Amino acid sequence: MKKIIFVAIISILPLLAFAQDSGKKQAYYFYGEKCPHCVKVNEYFTANGIYEKYNITKLEFSNPFNTRLLLKFGEKFNSEYKGSVPAVAFGDKFIVGDQPIIDNFVSEIEAAENANELPDPGSTADPSNNAGQKNQSVQDSQKAGSAAAPGDNQKGNKTNYFAVILIALVFVGGGALVYINRKKN
């Protein structure tokens, strides 16, 4: 009986680990710690369950690596507000400004067919909708400063090692239990 339960647990845990993120759409959310517009977006995301419904990778833009990534998205989408926060990037969309994000994020990410993985600003594909960039930009009064980032050769780490580590721990623990049980018998 114990062996059946043990085998069931070992076979279910990896499925749970891999299933945790499957199917959720993903986005980068660039924000500033002291940005009042970012506070509005964060409150909207929290109040409407956006963080639970989607995999949102929050990136504070004062970090040079995050700033570089934000600038790359701004350049890729030819945004006049590149380097400004709050901003979200997903699929082939880049939305800047608190009100444009609050008004458009849910409908845009739901309509995006390619938002199941984090976007890559270094890809050569052009965004499919540059005409709407003015509507997705923050007003001049909401512009935050942009910082130049050194070098362009860094890529964000998009690999989630949690599932691999969890599976390895399950197998090591299972092996240890089998070893201990054999010694007792």
Image (cartoon, rainbow, N blue to C red):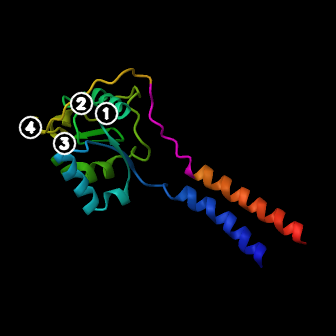
| Label 1: which secondary element | helix
Question: Taking 182 as reference, is 31 above or below it?
Answer: above
Q: Where is residue 60, by image quadrant? A: top left
Q: Where is residue 78, by image quadrant? A: top left
Q: Is residue 82 left or right of residue 135?
A: right
Q: Which residue is mark 2?
A: 82
Q: Which residue is mark 3?
A: 97
Q: Nearer the viewer, residue 163 or 115?
A: 163
Three-letter amino acid code of the residue under disc 2: Lys
Three-letter amino acid code of the residue under disc 1: Leu
Pick out the residue farthest to the top. Answer: 151
Dot 2 or dot 4, earlier in sequence: 2
Q: Nearer the viewer, residue 140 or 112?
A: 140
Looking at the rendering, the stretch of residues picked out in magenta corresponds to 154-162
Three-letter amino acid code of the residue under disc 4: Ser
Dot 3 or dot 1, earlier in sequence: 1
Dot 4 or dot 3, earlier in sequence: 3
Dot 4 or dot 1, earlier in sequence: 1
Q: Are marks 4 and 1 in contact (CB under 8 Å)?
A: no
| Circle 2 or circle 4, nearest the eye | 4
Q: Which residue is mark 4?
A: 141
